[in-house]
Image (cartoon, rainbow, N blue to C red):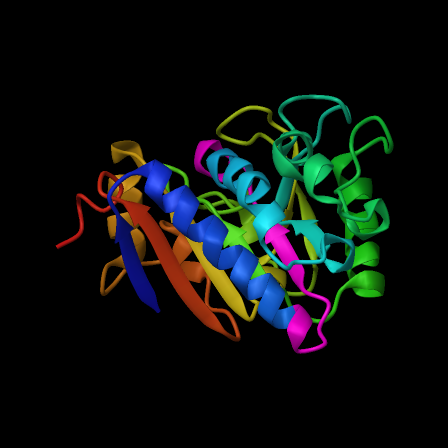
Amino acid sequence: MSVRVHESSESLATTVATELLARLAAAQEAGETPQIGLTGGTIADQLHREVARLAPASSVDWSRVVVWWGDERFVDSSSSDRNAVQAREAFLSQVGVDPANVHEIPSASEVATAEEAAEAYSATLREHGAGSFTVLMLGIGPDAHIASLFPHFPQLEVEDEIAVAVHDSPKPPPDRVTLTFPALNRADEVWFLAAGEGKADAVAAALAPTGAVPDTPARGIAPTGTVTWHLDRAAASALP
């Protein structure tokens, strides 16, 4: 695991966008079809806009990139609350991704319940996934939740499902779908993104020498590959 501290959220977004494009290009040069897992939130939106800005100068063939999400808000398909809508507007609509390779979690416009959405997404991942993410990006909440795995929620204990429904989320909207720890941990590289002083205590708890996953869900990320934390100065301010 490595921790990288950037001077600002802007420099974080630019650096990570540059490294993501390089990682995707290298995978394609090696004959792979890279599979990336996206996250939502303010810093993710900054990153996505930087990817769109820098993509024309890269060698990435976006028609051969497969896109997933670690979690999603169970709302109508056009809702700005959806991580997928934010990503489409910020960069997916601009870089030439093949729509067949963009695997959104079903919305409330398509299925009746979050449980149905989780079941359908699990089936899609089984059919079209490569067994692991090339790069999985995750945010972290002020309570140290990741994806939609919240402190002391029963979804933290699920070991035999790929995706599950979440209800009564402590932050709106209340209904969500999230990948479980076993699914999230099938990644060659996990990149945490955190910016702002409001994330500092959660980052410190996640990186502390000791702690419990029920209290700090970010501690449950232990992938098959590597973990890199990308922080701005404010998010890193509570680290020793």
Boundaries of the magenta span = 28-44
Residue at 46% over, 31% down? 42
Task: Answer left or right for 90 relative to 220.
Answer: right
Task: State the residue lying farthest toward the bottom.
Answer: 30
Q: Quadrant of residue 169?
A: top right
Task: State the residue lying farthest toward the front.
Answer: 57
Q: Reply above or below: 230 against 131.
A: above
Residue at 60% over, 24% down? 173
Task: Answer left or right for 165 relative to 13.
Answer: right
Task: Answer left or right for 196 relative to 99.
Answer: left
Residue at 47% over, 58% down? 19
User: Which residue is nearer to you in this view: 221 or 232?
Assistant: 232
In the rendered image, the quadrant that contains the N terminus is: bottom left
Can residue 217 be seen at all in this image of the molecule? no
Residue at 69% over, 51% down? 68
Q: Reply above or below: 217 against 189.
A: above
Q: Is residue 41 magenta?
A: yes
In the rendered image, the quadrant that contains the C terminus is: bottom left
Q: Reply above or below: 134 against 67.
A: below
User: Which residue is nearer to you in this view: 174 or 89?
Assistant: 89
Find residue 197 and report its horizontal and vertical position in percent: 25, 34
Task: Answer left or right for 54 relative to 216.
Answer: right
Q: Is residue 96 magenta?
A: no
User: Which residue is nearer to you in this view: 226 or 201?
Assistant: 226
Find residue 33 and report its horizontal and vertical position in percent: 73, 67
